[in-house]
Amino acid sequence: MNGSQDRDTPWRVHGVSVEGYRHRRSGVPCQDACEHRVVGPVTVLAVADGAGSRPRSDEGSKFAVRLAMDHFGRRAGALAALPGAKVRDALRETFLEVRQAFREHTGADAPDFATTLTVVVLAPEWIGQVSVGDGFVVLRAGTEDGVRQYHLLPQPAAVSEYSNETVFLTSNDAPDWVYDSCVKDPGVDGVLLSTDGLAQAALSRGPGGGTIPHTAFVEAVLRSLDAPGPVTDNAHDALAALLRSDRLTALNADDKTLLRAVRRGRS
Amino acid sequence: MSSEYPPTMPAEYADIEFENNAQRLPLVLCLDISSSMAGAPIQTLNTALAEWTRELQEDVSLSYSVEVAVVTFGGRFGVCSWRGPQLLDARAGVSPFVPAHMFQAPQLAASGVTLMTEALELSMRIIAARKAELRASGLQYYRPQICLVTDGLPTDATGHFTETWRRLIPVLEEEQRNRRFRLYAIGVGGITELGEQVLRNFAPKFNARIQGFPFRELLQMMSASANAEQKGAGDEVFEKIFSQFKTQRPAWES
């Protein structure tokens, strides 16, 4: 996936999914996927992480992000017009439509396509997130004492003590695990979506023990998209090389996805 | 690592400082070093441990994720844990886990009795303690692995066969049902039918009786299992890896 060519939209978007070290060594395709779509003043972003234990999860993750584009894209205008209080319910409803369509299409084989899905809608008045599984979203918003501020959107509680276990779009109890949030802050000028393959690189532990963004990483990957103009091949290759680097592999051998968006004309 | 993918950081991102917060995979090698292992078997084990350590360190991901602890039963002190090459004093409260990229294999010598039950109990204790440490440091982890290797029967401190191993059965059953760790129980050399029966009870799915002392293959199987854990593989993959090991085919074929 390459950078957005929609020059008159407020956001510049770029993302990439790369196969992890384990999959690279055994010739298994990347089971992550990401996509974005611009519909009028609304930008829809999605990342998905196919389950390592399921045979067709690489197709599942691609299918999930495509369905997210279709369903959220179709409702983009209506969503953007909603008053703030109604946004979260509408996001959840649309997300469950995506799940329904996914399950209908994959039928009895749905578990073979198991994948997580994280969707972000960038509307003129708000930014909404709706998700199932362990993907995560970080926002860049404003400065405090001249220092850029980064915020991790709320994450669900872990489903087990092990880091490689999560809930999937196809799980029977997925509706119970769908979580959403909506931010109304015109100061947000950068958004990063990722699958759990980057959790160690992009997230850190706060002084109170909670999870917070790892500023050095998030700052660097958003800053490189702040440069005006379309995303160059070099910039694309550099991000892919970062995700494939030994340094990141040492932190996590899983597939990695980074989908980033910054507001144009700000940096 | 394939040269197609430059492992180095692109210049634009070279100044990012990362934390040492890789997801951890605790691995306990619970090894029989009682007198029946003397001679060629213990030498084979030492050589295989050194070789496996090198291979593990060549794997960019396993080397930073896997943490190795060695527990031995036999020898002068009965049951011991090792932090790499260093024999630990049980009272010191030092964790025996060493990140694979820093692990050095101990030099083991064979003598003494087979306190297998106590060694497995120690293995479970150090895993529980390590999980607590990891949680307290905010580090994520995969399901730990214990690899029990023996050529004999559980004995008491005087070297006589004992039925005390039976006290472990309900404990291991519950621990494995709760997915606290994966236990592989492997009989080597001249292990008897009764010895094999003990292992079957410890690890109903993942037990084996292997001809000779194929420690190299055995350790490679542990790496393959760690690799599968990192990929989030399903139980059927672990069963396949194990069955390939049992039939002495390369574990990496999975």
Image (spheres, coloured by chain):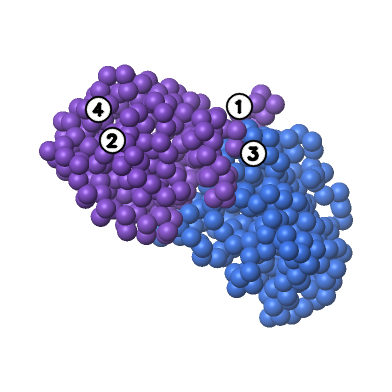
Q: Is mark 3 on a helix, strand or loop?
A: helix
The colour of chain A is blue
Q: Nearer the viewer, mark 1 or mark 2?
A: 2
Q: What element carries label 1?
A: loop
Same chain for mark 3 and mark 2? The answer is no
Q: What residue type is labelled 3?
A: His
- Total tally of numbered discs in the picture: 4
Q: Are marks 4 and 1 in contact (CB under 8 Å)?
A: no
Same chain for mark 1 and mark 2? The answer is yes
- Write down the residue under mark 2: B152
Mark pair 4, 3: CA separation: 41 Å
Chain of the residue that carries numbered disc 1 in the rendered image: B
* Left or right of residue B168: residue A247: right
- Write down the residue under mark 1: B1
Residue at left offset 34%, top offset 45%: B197
> Can you tell which quarter of the image residue B211 is in?
top left
Mark pair 1, 2: CA separation: 40 Å
* Mark closer to the chain start, 4 or 1: 1
- Write down the residue under mark 3: A23
* Left or right of residue B152: residue A34: right
Q: Nearer the viewer, mark 4 or mark 1?
A: 4
The colour of chain B is purple
Viewer-side residue, A176 vs A152 = A176
* Left or right of residue B109: residue B239: right
Residue at left offset 55%, top offset 65%: A156
- Write down the residue under mark 4: B36
Chain of the residue that carries numbered disc 2 in the rendered image: B
